[in-house]
Image (cartoon, rainbow, N blue to C red):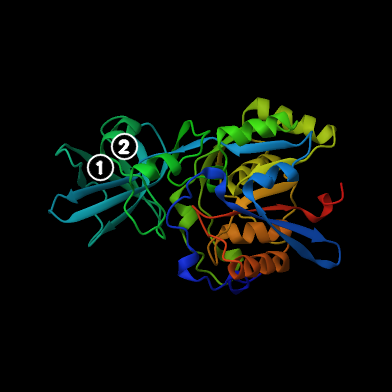
Amino acid sequence: MQLSNFNYELPTDLIAQHPLANRTDSRLLEIKPEVGKHAQLVDRQFKEILDLLKPGDLLVLNDTKVIPARLHGKKETGGNVELFIERISGERQAWVQIRASRVPKTGSIVHIYNTAGESFAVEMIGYDGRFYEVRFPENIFSLLERFGELPLPPYIEHQPNNEDAQRYQTVLAKNPGAVAAPTAGLHFDETILQKIKVLGVQQATITLHVGAGTFSPVREEDLSKHQMHHEWFSIPEATLKMIANTKQTGGRVIAVGTTSLRALESHAISGQSSGETNLFITPGFEFKTVDCLLTNFHLPKSTLLMLVSAFAGVENIRAAYQHAIAQRYRFFSYGDAMFLCRLENINS
C-alpha cells in the first residue's frame, strides 16, 4: 500500500477545538461491513453504544494519564527553547522533541522556567536521529507538575485552560506517562460505564502511554519504509484472563481506542504483557485478539488511519470518512467517534 491511499480532504471547520458540554454528547458512526458489499453506515448518538454492546462482551480501555509534557526554557546562550516530551525512559530521563533556532548539542544545559520564576536545569545526553534524550535533576513527574504545560494536539489552536485540564483526560486516567490522550476513552463518563456494567458487559484496562510520535506524519510513500514510533504498554494479568474467558464463552473483545488495540495485538504477537511496542498495523495485518473497535476520526496520512483501514477495509473506511464529512461530524481528539467490527465478527 502507498501513502496516497490514506489521504482525504477535511474542511478545517470540522476539526473540534473544544469538547462538548458532556462527554456522552458526541455522535457515533456505526460501520457495518457486509460480505461482498460496501459497509452500511448508521448515524447514532454516543449513548446508543449501549445498543451495540452485548452481554458477555469485554470492553478494554486505556487508563493512561496525560502528563504536562510541554516545557519552556532557555539555552546557555540565552536563546528560547521548547521541550516536548515524547516518552519517559527512566525516573530522571526522557526522550523529547526540541523546538529552537539551533538545537543544543549533547552535553549542554537547558534551563527550564515556570511562571512563578522558578527554574531547573536539564542536560542533553543523546540523540537517536529523531528525538533527543535529556536528563532531569530529580524525579520527572514532580518537576512536570510544577513546570509543565498540558500538551494539546497541534491542530487545537487555543492555549490549554481549566476545561482542557479536566476534559483532555479520561475518567479512568490513573497511570501518568502519556503525552496525548487516548481519545476514544474521552466519550465515557461514570454513568455510561455503570450502564454498560448493568448490561452484562465486562470492563478491563490496559496502559499504553501515548507518545508524541502519534502526531508525526508518515513521509514515506512506500509504507514499508516508515519507521514507527515506540510506546510503552502494560497489560495486567487480570485483563489477560478476562480476554481468554471472553473468547472461550463466545463474547467479543472490544478495544476502546487504537491504543488499546495496539497493546492487545502486540501481546498476541510477542507474548509480552509489558514493554515497548512499535507495532505498525497496515492493511493485510492479521488481528488475533480484538473483534470490535471504538475510535475517533484520524488525521489524513496517519498510521492510525492505516490501522482502522486494516481493521474494517480500506474502501469501507474511505466511504465512512466521506460520509462523516458530508454529515459534518466533528473530527480528531475532541471530535465524534465510530464503532466498527471486523468483517468475520459481524454475524457471530
Q: Residue at position x 28%, y 30% from top?
A: 138
Q: Is residue 195 visible?
A: yes
| Residue nearest the observer in this picture, 153 or 4 | 153
Q: Which residue is mark 1?
A: 123
Q: Residue at position x 67%, y 61% from top?
A: 309
Q: Quadrant of the N terminus?
A: bottom right
Decide: is 325 above or below 253.
below
Q: Using the rendered view, name the quadrant where residue 254 is placed.
A: top right
Neighbor class of circle 1 (other Cα within 10 Å; few <14, some 14-19, many 20+) is some
| Residue nearest the observer in this picture, 45 or 87 | 45
Decide: is 334 above or below 322.
above
Q: Using the rendered view, name the quadrant where residue 69 is placed.
A: top left
Q: Is residue 105 visible?
A: no
Side of 81 relative to 336 (left or right): left
The outermost residue toward the top is 238
Q: Which residue is mark 2?
A: 144
Q: Residue at position x 50%, y 52% from top?
A: 229
Q: CA distance from mark 2 to mark 1?
A: 16 Å
Neighbor class of circle 2 (other Cα within 10 Å; few <14, some 14-19, many 20+) is some
Which structural element holds mark 2? Answer: helix
Q: Position of residue 121 (x, y in %)?
A: 20, 39
The three-letter code of the residue at mark 1 reads Glu
Side of 113 relative to 208 (left or right): left
Q: Position of residue 160 (x, y in %)?
A: 34, 48
Q: Position of residue 345 (x, y in %)?
A: 82, 49
The three-letter code of the residue at mark 2 reads Leu
Q: Using the rendered view, name the quadrant where residue 8 is placed.
A: bottom right
Circle 2 or circle 1, nearest the eye: 2
Which structural element holds mark 1? Answer: strand
Counting residues from the start of the chain, the first of labels 2 and 1 encountered is 1
| Residue nearest the observer in this picture, 333 or 178 | 333
